[in-house]
Each structure stands twice: as C-alpha cells, then as structure tokens.
Amino acid sequence: QVAVRRKPRIAVIPTGTELVTPGGALKPGNIIESNSLVLAGLADECGAVATRLDPVPDDYEQLKQALRRALHEHDIVLLNAGASAGRRDFTAALVSEMGQVVVHGVAIRPGHPVVLGLVDGKPVVGLPGYPVSAALTFDLFVRPLIYRLQGLAIPQRTSIEALMTRKVFSPMGQEEFLRVKVGKVSGEYLAMPLQRGAGTTMSLVRADGLVRIPSESEGLRERQ
C-alpha cells in the first residue's frame, strides 16, 4: 500500500450576461466565452482535473446557486469576471455572504481586482474578466495552490538577464508583470515589450517571458 493524493478538482465558472458559449448564436453586445478554456488548460497543466461550467448571467441568486453546486463537487472554484467593484460585480459580496473574503484587490498590474476567499473551507478565487489579467492571476495565486494540494514543490521557471529594447514607464505602488519577446543578439539577451492591455489576448501567445517591475520602481531603462 502507498499513500497517494487525489488530483485537485477545479471548477471554472464564467460569469457575465453578455457571454455566449463557442458556437452559440451571437447578438450585438455578446462576447464569445473563451477564458474558461484557457483557465481549465492551465489547471490541467498543473495536474488538476478542471471542469468548465456553463456561463452564469450577472444575477446574484443564480451565481449563488452555481457556486454552491460547484463547491459540493470540487476542491477549488474559480469565478471568472465579476471581481471588480462595478454595479454587476457580485463575486466579493457573494463570497463574503457564503464564507470569508481574505483579499479583495492586490497591488499588481494587470490583475488588480482579484478576490481570494474561503467558502465551506474551500478556496474560491474571483479572477478578473480580461484575458491577460485572468491568466496572470491564475499563475500567481491558483497555480501554487494546486501544487500544494498535491504535496508537490512549485516548479520554478527559468530566469535570465536581458536588456530592454526600449524604455518602459510603470506607475509606482503597483508590481507590474510585463510580457516580452526575448531574443539573443551578439551574445546578449534582449527583451522587447509587448502590448500591455489586459485584454490583448495575442500578447499571451507571442510572449516568451515576463519581466517583473517592482512596485517601488517607475519603470525600466532601455539598453545603452
């Protein structure tokens, strides 16, 4: 006999009245729901078993029922979108009513309006709706949790020194994670900043790495 750990079961719940599942009929103002595909894939890469649930409209009671059902069968629940402070952003209030909000909002860019909470002793994470923010906050907060639940060390990514191809300005007070292309020229690594918008999905595809800009910094200088 050997002691083993069951793979963590992750539920991904997309939220938003405007969301339409891929292949569904689109009307003006609709958005094809794709974040759950990315988040479930990232969870699977970490060794979890991810389940994509149907999108839930911006309705408090429907979200509450969906969260309760997901908690019954899963170890971690990811609520995608609704984590900010808008009129139809219910994640923080929902987690607060059903359990405990540990953190609402972190000083990072992108991904500021993340919600970290516990309901029935299980982690519930509210991820921002913008694709780049959702992927980054998953990497920072959910990925380590999945590995810890499996009793595994968190894999460390390769780190290199590179020169910036142009000057980058960054607001103080927020830790920024800048997506870059990386190349080697004349024996030196060069990092070229990509578009920084939280909704610039293709930057996730094109990026070779991340540059971390500390919160006390106003940016990075270009190579001299």
Image (tube, rainbow, N blue to C red):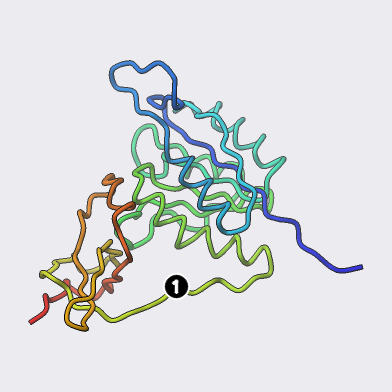
Q: Nearer the viewer, residue 167 or 59?
A: 167
Locate the N terminus and report the quarter of the image it occupies: bottom right
Instruction: Identify which residue is drawn at 39% across, 32% down.
Output: 88
User: Residue 32, image x and y in percent?
Assistant: 38, 29
Q: Nearer the viewer, residue 81 or 156?
A: 156
User: Residue 100, image x and y in percent?
Assistant: 57, 52
What is the quadrant of residue 30 in the picture? top left
Q: Nearer the viewer, residue 170 or 42?
A: 42
Looking at this rendering, what residue extends furthest in the right direction?
1
Task: Say left or right for 201 vs 42.
Answer: left
Q: Residues within 10 Å of mark 1 (few under 14, many from 20)?
A: few
Callout 1: helix, strand or loop? loop
Instruction: Identify which residue is drawn at 62% across, 50% down.
Output: 76
User: Mark 1 = which residue?
Assistant: 157
Looking at this rendering, what residue extends furthest in the front direction?
186
Q: Is residue 121 above or below residue 165?
A: above
